[in-house]
Image (cartoon, rainbow, N blue to C red):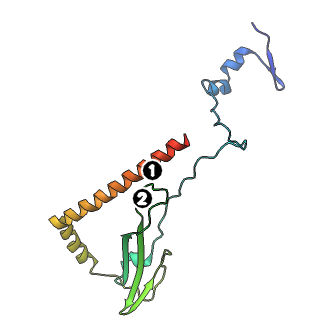
Amino acid sequence: MRAPRRLGCAIFSEDTLKTSLTSRFLAGWEPAVFPSRGPDGLIPAPPPRSLPVLEQPSLCEAGPCRHYHRVASLMDAAAPIDGSASEAHEQIVRACYPAPGIELELGEAPVSKCSRWEPDNEQSRLDTIRNAYLRSSAGQAYTEQIQALEVAARATQLEINADEEAVEL
């Protein structure tokens, strides 16, 4: 039998160390390997992650208001200078047309109160007409074109991400 070891102010034998709660918890545990240090002697930080975008509720969309218009279109942006592919970005324009000839651009901030808020009772009728069009052959062709564009944009972005990961390694 081995002589007891002194840890701190208590004396423990090897048998006690093998059966203690701490030793059982740490059994099989290996410390993580640190990444190599950079030229400045610091451990490099991982690339920043984008935060999820949370849309706040807006009164204009609650009804929805008959004066509210939201238009999403692809931005006409120039390709990167280095020739790499870029993902397609959507431009979203939110506007209010409270009376003929009056336009208010709403921007990104949600609207909480409005003196001209008028819930639109025609929205369900318009949704029915839009859904009927999307079920038609012309609507299905349009939907397929949009889906193909989104798939191509995602594939391009995945290639760019893979290239960036390869460069980091």
Image height check: is 131 above or below 117?
Answer: above
Quadrant where the image shows the N terminus? top right
Q: Give the amino acid type for the residue marked by disc 2 in the picture.
A: Glu
Q: Is residue 63 visible?
A: no
Residue extending furthest toward the left: 137
- Identify which residue is drawn at 23% across, 72% down: 130
Image height check: is 53 above or below 127?
Answer: above
Residue extending furthest toward the front: 82
Circles 2, 1 touching at the beta carbon (< 8 Å): yes
Q: Helix, strand, or loop for circle 2?
A: loop
83 and 54: which is toward the camera = 83
* Residue 169 coordinates in the image, percent (x, y): 54, 39
> Which mark is first along the chain, 1 or 2?
2
* Residue 120 coordinates in the image, percent (x, y): 32, 82
Q: Give the amino acid type for the residue marked by disc 1 in the picture.
A: Ile
Q: Quadrant of residue 122?
A: bottom left
Q: Which residue is mark 1?
A: 160
38 and 131: which is toward the camera = 38
Q: CA distance from mark 2 to mark 1?
A: 9 Å
* Residue 112 coordinates in the image, percent (x, y): 49, 79
**Left or right of 73 in this view: 161:** right
- Identify which residue is drawn at 45% across, 71% down: 57
Residue 87: which numbered mark, if any?
A: 2
